[in-house]
Image (cartoon, rainbow, N blue to C red):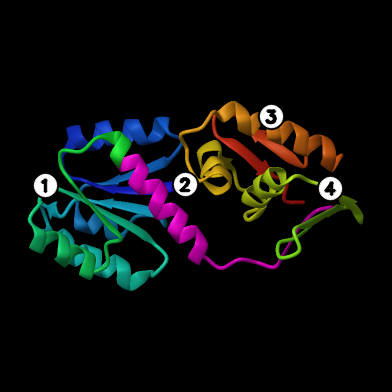
Amino acid sequence: MRILLVEDDRRVAAALSSALTRRGYEVERAATVAAALSAAPCDLVLLDLNLPDGDGVDLCRELRRRSNQLGIIAVTARGEERDRVLGLRLGADDYVVKPFSMVELQARIEALLRRTAHTRPQRDRIEAGPLRLDVAGRTVTVDDREVALTRKEFDILLSIARQPGVAVSRDRILLDVWGTTFADRHTVEVHVASLRGKLGEPGLVETVRGVGYRLRAG
């Protein structure tokens, strides 16, 4: 999961980046409106409304104009009701007032990512090498052999298979399957080990050290 952190205060940005990275997110920082507008695509934006080269509210409106699927959380010291209402009306999905705890911010990120996951386009069928995954029918075949999976195993495979060849973090899997990142990551490892055994195809689900897992693309 890629997060764009739009924050001009270096100390705040460094602390947030470090905390988010430890939680498995890939973080890019932008200190200005211009840098935010030229940043690489991301899944979610944490947006400070007080920026040195422009108003974060205008940036929020432009980011929303570019994408209806992008998650935007305003993170700012502007705590008055009119500021919160304006930010939400111009495209922010949520609003966090400084100072805040990382536990609160993490919970808000998870809630927003759950909502955006439900609205993103879903493919009915996914194919990668010998794997065929029927999303609607919740069936899996490998080399035309049907594989019986538990609900959790299927959901883990679906989380990884949405982007074959792309590493998916353990936190993203926890969020997709369990609805939270406040869970034992060892649980993911146990389910993935069982999933690999049932698929019977060595290397189909690859471990990406320090990140999570990816489905072999070919």
Q: Which residue is mark 3?
A: 190
Point out the tag, 3 or 2, that comes first from the N-terminus.
2
- Rendering coords of residue 68 (x, y %): 39, 70
Point out the tag, 4 or 3, that comes first from the N-terminus.
4
Q: Is residue 28 left or right of residue 100?
A: right
Element type at marker 4?
A: loop
Element type at marker 1?
A: loop
> Residues in magenta?
105-132
Amino acid under label 4? Answer: Ala
Residue 1 is marked as 2
Point out the tag, 1 or 3, that comes first from the N-terminus.
1
Real-space CA distance between mark 1 and mark 2, rounded to the nearest whole angstrom? 26 Å
Query: Which of the two discs, 1 and 2, sits closer to the camera?
Result: 1
- Rendering coords of residue 105 (x, y %): 30, 42
Query: In this orientation, which residue lies closer to the viewer: 18 or 97?
Result: 97
Determine the image quadrant of residue 35: bottom left
- Rendering coords of residue 163 (x, y %): 62, 54
Amino acid under label 2? Answer: Met
Residue 77 is marked as 1
Q: Which residue is mark 4?
A: 148
Element type at marker 3?
A: helix
Real-space CA distance between mark 1 and mark 3, rounded to the nearest whole angstrom? 42 Å
Amino acid under label 1? Answer: Ala
Amino acid under label 3? Answer: Val
